Amino acid sequence: AAPHGGWQGPVRQPGRREADQDKDYVGFATLPNQVHRKSVKKGFDFTLMVAGESGLGKSTLVNSLFLTDLYKDRKLLNAEERITQTVEITKHTVDIEEKGVKLKLTIVDTPGFGDAVNNTECWKSVADYIDQQFEQYFRDESGLNRKNIQDNRVHCCLYFISPFGHGLRPLDVEFMKALHEKVNIVPILAKADTLTPTEVKKKKFKIREEIQQYGIKIYQFPDCDSDEDEDFKQQDQELKDSIPFAVIGSNTVVEAKGKRVRGRLYPWGIVEVENSAHCDFVKLRNMLVRTHMQDLKDVTRETHYENYRAHCIQSMTRMVVKERNRKPRSRG
């Protein structure tokens, strides 16, 4: 009798075709799965800033986008309090989980922006906040313990434009020009249900024209790869044509044609938030969450943060050179 429990019968030899396949297959085709598993385990983070004057529906839109209530404890100021109010920066962080994927979402709000009698340089504290996050990340990255660096860099800024003016106001131009080198700006035409479809079209065209005229660099959607399918290319083109996104926010559910939908009930009918014929809410949500969230993070890391980092290193180098030149040289 053979050792280890007797004879087991002939061992099946792999066929020539299988052996050849194994020779050609190294195994790195599974790398995307490994990356996916690791990423899902680690979770994702995203920081979204909302800016624009009060009363344009910023809080409602954020709650509608992520189906959360981030502003439960908010205290609304009266007109007198708003006169003396300065721009403050508030942060709300919420952990969202969907199909096992965790997202740590941080909403950075700018209450008081554009509300004072004199709004000169009211965007300065917003710009300072963005720089502070870059500075903190730069310090952490240059430190000894780089294992658990918290990324609080602002990945996207939704800038709300009032539907009641003729295109952009001077404050809008000032804000976007001051921040366009620091953050991805996505312009939003707020409260679109106060405009007729023709007015929305005209206003979008005027805002796009002015953005170009004043040399404002808003977030540019990346071009599609040539191998993408036609549906995706069409979707991408529709997104580009939708700038600025005309949006309506609502956290209430109403009944329309026997269906329960999120919308706003008016004496003449219902405006559905998630109906593409009524507004661009779904396009904005898809862009922010489903299709371009990673690209917004990549552009923040590779362009805006890199510019800041290069500027810091240049300043440090200049200081070192200055210091070296100041020291008297010892004579031999």
Image (cartoon, helix red, strand yellow):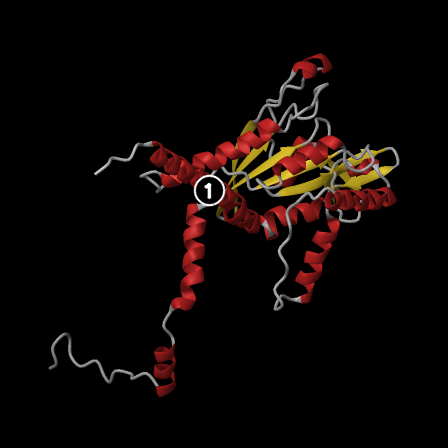
Q: Which residue is drawn at 21% across and 80% down?
A: 8
Residue 21 shown left or right of residue 228 in the figure: left
Nearest the camera: 22 or 219?
219
| Quadrant including the C terminus | top left
Can you tell which quarter of the image residue 234 is in? bottom right
Nearest the camera: 299 or 272?
299
The residue under label 1 is: 309
Can you tell which quarter of the image residue 47 is in? top right
Nearest the camera: 11 or 5?
11
List x then y, in percent, for residue 49.
60, 35
| Secondary element at image label 1 | helix
List x then y, in percent, for residue 42.
42, 46
Asked whether residue 4 appears in the rendered view, the answer is yes
User: Mark 1, residues whose alpha carbon is within 10 Å: few (<14), some, or many (≥20)?
Assistant: some
Q: Which residue is drawn at 48% across and 41% down?
A: 311
What amino acid is at disc 1? Arg
Q: Is residue 296 above or below residue 126?
A: below
Asked whether residue 149 appears in the rendered view, the answer is no
Residue 328 shown left or right of residue 198 in the figure: left
Q: In this view, does 113 lie above or below 85?
A: below
Q: Residue at x 29, y 84 (%)?
A: 13
Q: Is residue 1 above or below residue 319?
A: below
